Image: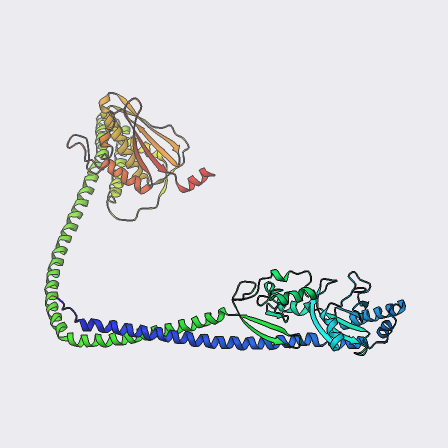
Amino acid sequence: MPRPLPQKRLLRPALLIAGLLAMTALLSAAAFALAQYTASARLEAELRDRLTVTRHSVVTEIERFRYLPAVVGQDARVRALLAHPGNAAAVDAANAYLQTVRDLSGVDELYVTDAQGLTVAASNWNQPGSFLGHSYAFRPYFQGAMQDGAARYYAVGVTTGKPGYFLSARLGPASAPTGVAVVKVDMATLEGTWVRANEHVALADPDGVIFLSGPRNWKYRPLQPLAAPALERMLAERRYDGLDITAAVPLTGAITSDTREPLRIARAALEPDGWQIVVGLPSAPVLRSAWQVAGLAALAGLLASVGALIFWQRRQLIRLKLNQNVVLERRVAERTAELAHEIEERRRAEDELRQTHESLVHAAKLAVLGRMSAAIVHEVSQPLSALDNTLAAAELHLSRGDTGRVGNSLGSARGLLRRMQTMVRHLKTFGAKQKLTPPEPVDMAAVLAASAEILEPRLRELGVGLALPAPASLPPVSGNAVRLEQVATNLLLNAAEASAGAGPVTITAALDLHAPGLRLTIADRGPGIPEDMRERIMEPFFTTRVTGEGLGLGLSIVRTILEQTGGTLTFAPRPGGGTLTLVDLPLHQASASKAAR
């Protein structure tokens, strides 16, 4: 029995595996931390780049119209209007001028107010929602322009309800201002660019309320809860007129996109308006990248660990093999001796088996020869009886001097001899493995006629008549004429011998088409076949006759011939007593195709 391994030897692999797994875990953790730090740094750098690009695009969008309010205020038509506010011609001229400047510059709207904030000219003077006649003295852009000379302000229009960026400039000297020129810039184009590009970018006012954003769920939401003074100021300025800013949920905590994806947020101030630029990027790729790197590190560690284990085990196996060489050599020698003894025993058993096999083959050959001899005796006995009767008839005719009938009898005897020769030649193939001749068309009416000729003396001796079917144009069957004649002879003779004890009777043979071929029906008046013998009646050497009167091979030979030709043999009780022998034969192929057409 193998000796148990020492405890130290079992402990070493466990400690080695535990150490390798610990090193792999540490390597994976370090790789995760390093990958997360690197990915976060890249994300922060990308956020800074986005802030720079966004600041540049916003400033560019605004600064291109910075000059326009002051330029508009220098036009003579605007000055004439402010000098004569009630002059209808001056109003029309100023309106037409502002409309032309709007169309050429691409701004949303332009308008001019007097020193009290009342609009006296506007580019939308002839449109619904015109600014004419509306006072905007409450707006910070008006107040800032009157105080500082210029101002800027983003708000939702109280007249049109459309948001925009308002740029204003004071007209006239600071000591005696005559009015304010205002340009409204629509920044929806910039916002639409962010939306189409799926950018997580937003602009927030000085109080932290987002007024432009790429994500839909950010707009008009504060970055933090709004204080009461800020809310009061927004309401007084009507900055987001028509919007309930107080009900907006602040964007605090984890900020997500429209698809609820977590975002890393970066902010930057945008002066001089005091705005905030908010830029977000998905943070999931950072963790995903870190986990991927950690997984690769773990895989590399595991592969290295497996390699180390394999190397260690290989060394252990080499050591064990070196220690066990002596034991193995001894066991090989012992096993070699055992194998030599087993080989000798097996050779002796094979010789005995070969001799037994040869004896069995010889016995099988003898059995086949015996069965063939019995079959030949059985099949030839019928035409021999007919030949004996024919020769006896020839002697009788010769004694009477009837030479004509003697010649007929001798011719019939020669025909019986030739038929016996053919029959014996075909019987030799029974039980042998050989190729069968190709099937040929066979006329079953002629086969029945030939069988009746062979059986005529025997039927006369038994006192049994035979009724054959009337000639009819039936298609030929597929098979061999001589073999089918053996089938018919055997079956007709069986029917005659079964009916012999019932007095002078007649057995009938009928041919008719029966799907899918031709059926031969032989009806006898015998006692019938008992139920318990129907399964054994076609077994070789089984017979119900008195010993010496039959060999029990007739039905076995019939079944063999029918199986070779594709036919079947069945028995059924005859109404009124007796047995119906049913033989189904396939039609010849050419005849079958014609019948089908």
Percent x, y of residue 471: 39, 29
Percent x, y of residue 353: 13, 55
Placement of 470 over or under 146, stated as above or below: above
Placement of 168 over or under 374, stated as above or below: below
Along the viewing direction, whichever of 179 and 174 lies nearer the viewer? 174
Report the side of 532 relative to 111 (left or right).
left
Placement of 209 over or under 446, stated as above or below: below
Along the viewing direction, whichever of 473 and 387 lies nearer the viewer? 473
Placement of 106 over or under 467, stated as above or below: below
- Residue 318: quarter of image: bottom left
Along the viewing direction, whichever of 360 and 389 lies nearer the viewer? 360
Report the side of 470 relative to 407 (left or right).
right
- Is residue 166 in view from this perspective? no
Task: Report the colour scheme.
Answer: rainbow
Along the viewing direction, whichever of 454 and 142 lies nearer the viewer? 142
Report the side of 1 relative to 404 (left or right).
left
Quarter holding the N terminus is bottom left
- Residue 179: quarter of image: bottom right
- Residue 485: quarter of image: top left
Report the side of 52 relative to 588 (left or right).
right
Q: Residue at 36% x, 28% y: name it.
A: 469
Q: Residue at 49% x, 68% y: name it.
A: 284
Percent x, y of residue 73: 81, 75
- Is residue 56 in view from this perspective? yes
- Number of numbered tags placed on the structure image: 0
Which residue reaches farthest top?
Answer: 503
Percent x, y of residue 158: 73, 63
